[in-house]
Image (cartoon, helix red, strand yellow):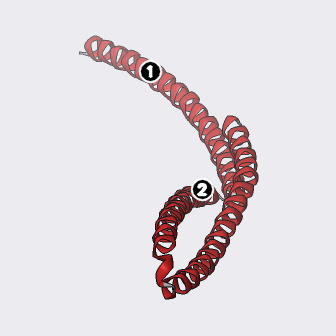
Amino acid sequence: MLTANKLEKIIELEDNLRGEYQAKLDAKSADIERLQKELADQKEQLQATIDRQLATITDLSDKATANQNIEQLNRELGNRSEKLQDEVSSLKKRVKALQKDLASEREQVSKLTQYDPARMKKNLDTNKKKLAEKTAANELLQKSLSKTKTENAELQHKIQELEGKLAELDADGNTEEEAAA
């Protein structure tokens, strides 16, 4: 009976955990998709920014008198691209971390789903029936054993009585033979 209660508690715990972690998995999946979209959007924005800045640089390079301005823009573009690359690398790290979290959550869900409550309940019911059958058979065997022990004791008692009578008869027979001799 304790194991049935424990199994029911395990089944309840599994349902609770499944409910709790499924929402987290869905949220993490949504976060990953959102971050991937943001990364793609940022790449497009970066590319658009780079294209605009490249056009600006091209225009300035055509003007020989504006070399100093071009150098300044190049420095700014370098700084921006470094910042953007840093952002991209941090976003990539974040995506990787989220993917790892998602993988661990999926692993936990797969571990939890291997304990199928319906199958465990069916096995529990089957085991209860087998236990009841074995208990009934054991009771019958115990009754039969006690009955056999009682009969054996009675038979042993009869054997002792008969051996006693036989010994008396032998003793009486020996005394009669001696008296007859």
| Residue identified by numbered label 2 | 105
- Quarter location, residue 108: bottom right
Relative to 154, is 29 on the left or the right?
Answer: right
Q: Nearer the viewer, residue 111 or 154?
A: 111
Q: Is residue 59 depicted above or below 166 in this figure? A: below
Q: Position of residue 92 (x, y in %)?
A: 52, 64
Q: Amino acid at mark 1?
A: Gln
- Quarter location, residue 164: top left
Q: Position of residue 72 (x, y in %)?
A: 49, 67
Q: CA distance from mark 1 to mark 2?
A: 78 Å
Q: Nearer the viewer, residue 99 or 77?
A: 77
Q: Position of residue 42 (x, y in %)?
A: 63, 71
For image coordinates 37% across by 18% down, the residue present is 167
Element carrying mark 1:
helix
| Residue identified by numbered label 1 | 160
Q: Is residue 160 depicted above or below 28 in this figure? A: above
For image coordinates 61% across by 81% down, the residue present is 52
Q: Nearer the viewer, residue 53 or 137?
A: 53
- Quarter location, residue 56: bottom right
For label 2, the crowd category at 10 Å Cα-Cα, with few meaning under 14, some 14 to 19 and many 20 or more, is: some
Q: Amino acid at mark 2?
A: Glu
For label 1, the crowd category at 10 Å Cα-Cα, with few meaning under 14, some 14 to 19 and many 20 or more, is: few
